[in-house]
Amino acid sequence: MSFLTGPMHHHLEGHKELTSHKDILNMTDPDVIWVPLMNGNAPCTPLVSVGDKVNIGTKIAERNDHFYLPVYSPVSGTVVAIEKRMSTTLKNVDHMKIENDHQNTVDKPFNPIDYESVSNEELLEFVKNAGMLGLGGAGFPTYAKFTNPTNVDLFIINGVECEPYLTADYKNMMENLSLLKTGTLALLKLSQAKKGCIAVKEDKKDLIAKLQETFNGTNVEVRTVPDIYPAGWERTLVLLLTGRRYDRLPIEAGCILNNASTAIALADALVNGMPLRQKYVTVSGDGVKEPKNVIVTIGTPAHDVIEACGGYTSEEVKVIAGGPMMGNSIPNDLFVVGAPVNGLTVLNYKPEKEVKCLRCGKCTETCPSGLEPVRINNAEKIKDIDTLVKLDVNACIECGMCSYICPSKIDVTEGVRRAKRYMALKK
Ligand code: SF4
Ligand code: SF4
């Protein structure tokens, strides 16, 4: 089946002005952190014990199934517990609790390298050992995309950030142009593509000018995309930039994509020999008093980050890990900012009365994956597995458009998510 049969022409109110030009708050010296011992659905095995001293860069855990991913300590201090906390996927998972000694002692886990002079194999090994992972929301180990890059003709840095409210990538790019250039050129080398591009929305004039200056003289072009949602979704972006579609992976269409913040984090490892320990996070929405971008140490509870932004505007708010379209609504703010979390969207709770489906078909017209969300919802209610299989439920990217567009205020996306969970159980 081919994707993207939907119209995907939706301009959403971005609300980016709430944070895009405000100063960034630095929260990189928390007293305690809880590092999630999970990557995607795969647990990471702890390599240190309760009572052990760790430094910034000490390898504290690793994923070691069909993918390898080391996890490095973002602070120096003492491991005081391994305990369950709810994650952004609403599952209870192990977290390593570390008390920060505020000494910032560093254990460099690897040496910086010059990506231009090493072989592709050495560079790939470096990316793997540095624990680089997708910071755009997926958290997928970065090296895995580059293990067999055959017939790649375009490497793409995704700086589109199409979710409303989120400006963390924009701020990160604006402030770290030199690292962005290094990380992009290193990943371009790994992709073996002859050219690369960095894609941003056409309304980001200041960023576009800076990127053009930064990448001048390289084989990385700055490309702009219209302000539509979900322009930053990989399938949409590949289609917008190349006119090509694919079924499973972008490499089928000759493309590899990485998020802009991932490229910046990789450059920090290449240039400074430092693993990922903090990230840019947008805290925004009408439910938080002082929306802004914050540089947060991995493992800091959302509650602390929101408090540092003035706290909530009312007692009835909805907290979303990520943006309002693709993020997960979380019933409390005790979850921590892990590597894939790029935003905390806080919205005043507005009860909306759901009414019966009008059969208007808007959810089907809107779905960028060409699905029939209303039929999926109906089949899920009666647990009709055969129909769910036919309706290709797993092609849903959970973009949230079907709920957003529904005039009956039905949370259609949640019904599709339930269907996906049900299908997974029945496998
Ligand atoms: S969330 Fe809804 S609109 Fe988006 S891909 Fe899934 S079914 Fe389609
Ligand atoms: S958009 Fe809402 S009301 Fe319209 S068909 Fe889909 S579920 Fe029904």
Image (cartoon, rainbow, N blue to C red):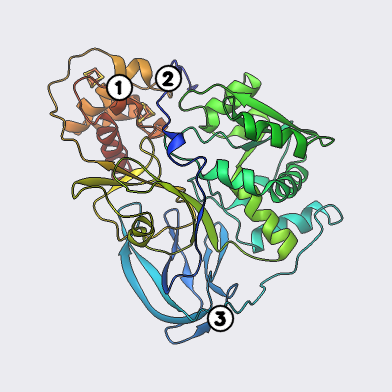
Q: Is residue 62 above or below residue 249?
A: below
Task: Tell which of 32 and 238 is nearer to you.
Answer: 32
Q: Which residue is mark 2?
A: 10
Q: Quadrant of ligand 2?
A: top left
What amino acid type is highlighted by mark number 2? Answer: His
Task: Tell which of 158 and 153 is nearer to you.
Answer: 158
Residue 269: where, in percent of width, then height? 68, 61
Q: Which residue is mark 1?
A: 405
Q: Earlier in the sequence, mark 3 or mark 2?
A: 2
Task: Tell which of 28 and 234 is nearer to you.
Answer: 28
SS state under label 2: loop
Q: Which residue is mark 3?
A: 103
SS state under label 3: loop
Which image quarter: residue 54?
bottom right
What amino acid type is highlighted by mark number 1? Answer: Ile
Q: Judge left or right: residue 79 versus residue 67.
A: left
Q: Does label 1 point to a residue whose CB lies under 8 Å from ligand 2?
A: yes
Q: Quadrant of the C terminus?
A: top left
- Distance CA(mark 3)–CA(mark 1): 51 Å
